[in-house]
Image (cartoon, rainbow, N blue to C red):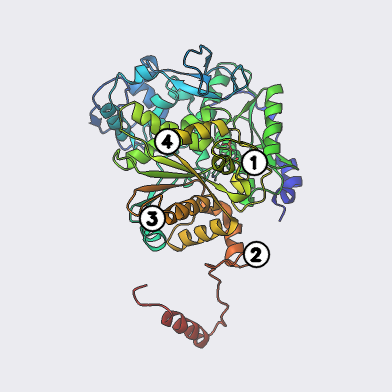
Amino acid sequence: MAATHLLRSSLFLQNPNPNTTLKPHHHTFKPTTIKSTISSEPNTPTPPPISKHRRPADESIRQEAHRRHDNSSKNTFSAKYVPFNSDPNSEESYSLDEVVYRSRSGGLLDVQHDIEALKEFDGAYWKSLFDSRVGKTTWPYGSGVWSKKEWVLPEIDSDDIVSAFEGNSNMFWAERFGKQFLGMNDLWVKHCGISHTGSFKDLGMTVLVSQVNRLRKMGKPVYGVGCASTGDTSAALSAYCASAGIPSIVFLPANKISMAQLVQPIANGAFVLSLDTDFDGCMQLVREVTAELPIYLANSLNSLRLEGQKTAAIEILQQFDWEVPDWVIVPGGNLGNIYAFYKGFHMCKELGLVDRIPRLVCAQAANANPLYLYYKSGWKDFSSVKAKTTFASAIQIGDPVSIDRAVYALKNCDGIVEEATEEELMDAMAQADSTGMFICPHTGVALTALHKLRKSGVISPTERTVVVSTAHGLKFTQSKIDYHSKVIPDMACSLANLPVNVKADFGSVMDVLKKYLESKDSRQ
Ligand SMILES: Cc1ncc(COP(=O)(O)O)c(C=O)c1O
Ligand SMILES: N[C@@H](CCOP(=O)(O)O)C(=O)O
């Protein structure tokens, strides 16, 4: 059903004019309890002592953070924008407080940290600092992103941070799935989609919206924040902006995102434009519009986003007690995330937390596979494609803005690109769900890549492998309903689990249950 069309008229009436709320103000996410506090002073070489305390009733979590350790005044770490993969002699750079998305030559930018300053502390220091912050409510370090603040946005005042304590997502040991379908015993699914707005985009959006909050407080003319989206970026943008009282504007391809995704920005009060084009068309438009209007661009073309997303890689290492997995498989669309993972792993190696990085696999839907085709050509011929409809609708992208970043990442980690047909991705999703997960179709794409690489022997049964699950399955229930109802044309839906219609009397119910139990081995 035409989700965007269905809601179009009512959303038009409900949305306030985004340009009427220009005054920046603080966001309102405020955890209410503090269990314990660990000083998070970044320039102290040994982890500080743990002290138990209760915050006074009239003090907010931020005020407490200020009182205990206002580290912004002592901070010696810094970061700036530089042209992506630039000549080491290039002197082109920009402050993160500038509004800039492209280099002088029109290329991508990257956030470059002062690695020498970070290197003044050894790997053991960083590991114990990051470990000391996990699972706490200390502002802002209770967030999985901001627990790595020195590596993310070292100069931002903690007061300006807009956070929902994102990150620290579950690493699920896919024991049954691994054994039953892949003959693997060390398979893990990093559930980045079990998050505030239901996708990994929260990791990047907390960083971007925090920086916007800072810019607005500095009096920079940023009246709103805008993005093109296949559903998850817009959900994250609108939630974080709403939390901070910043207007958000989202460009969505009409009829191409799930109802659950569409309702997120609507509910969060974004200005929602439903456009009769695909994601690539929306992306083109938002780039043109943000060049003309004081609207800050929130897509991953903006390298700030990737600083947050890279923390998922650091978190994976942390969750394995800083042991490096052999493989990490990530579904790819606009291709910022695969580079973010590479960057996170690479920083850990460069700063001495680990001694190697995993091999990365980027998995694409066969219906939207420009990176796969490029990889198969031996990195010779890149052309964008017209992305076709896919159940993995959030990666229905034919002209990825971060193509150069993805190629760089994959070349530098001996990476691989795989693809999944619609039937493959839906079957993989159904298999995973049948073992207790409830994943999104994009994760089905990543699992298909794993199937193929296991089958070809590239990934061995004992290699530690992490599949990155990028969104919550509840955002994509319609695809699961279609699959289990066997209504998808030309798809066998071989794992469909149809409900049984039974007469509501004891005898009929007993009959079907006996048959069911007979069909089951008692150990199954
Ligand atoms: C659920 C989901 N998975 C994967 C991706 C791919 O991420 P990227 O665009 O960074 O390649 C996206 C967005 O594009 C997404 O929303
Ligand atoms: N899947 C994304 C597509 C846009 O990607 P971005 O990382 O460049 O914002 C979405 O959910 O919109």
Give above or below for 147 relative to 437.
above
- Residue where numbered disc 2 is placed: 490
Q: CA distance from mark 3 to mark 4?
A: 24 Å
- Residue where numbered disc 4 is placed: 413
For numbered disc 4, what is the local secondary structure?
loop
Residues at badges 4 and 1 in contact (C-beta under 8 Å)?
no
Q: Amino acid at mark 3?
A: Ala
Residues at badges 3 and 4 in contact (C-beta under 8 Å)?
no
Is residue 163 visible in the rendered image? The answer is no
Task: Give coordinates of residue 111: x percent, y percent.
Answer: 49, 23
Q: Which mark is residue 398?
A: 1
For numbered disc 3, what is the local secondary structure?
loop
Q: CA distance from mark 3 to mark 1?
A: 31 Å
Q: CA distance from mark 4 to mark 2?
A: 38 Å
Q: Amino acid at mark 1?
A: Gly
Which residue corresponds to the image point at 71% horizontal and 56% vertical from the top-left? 1
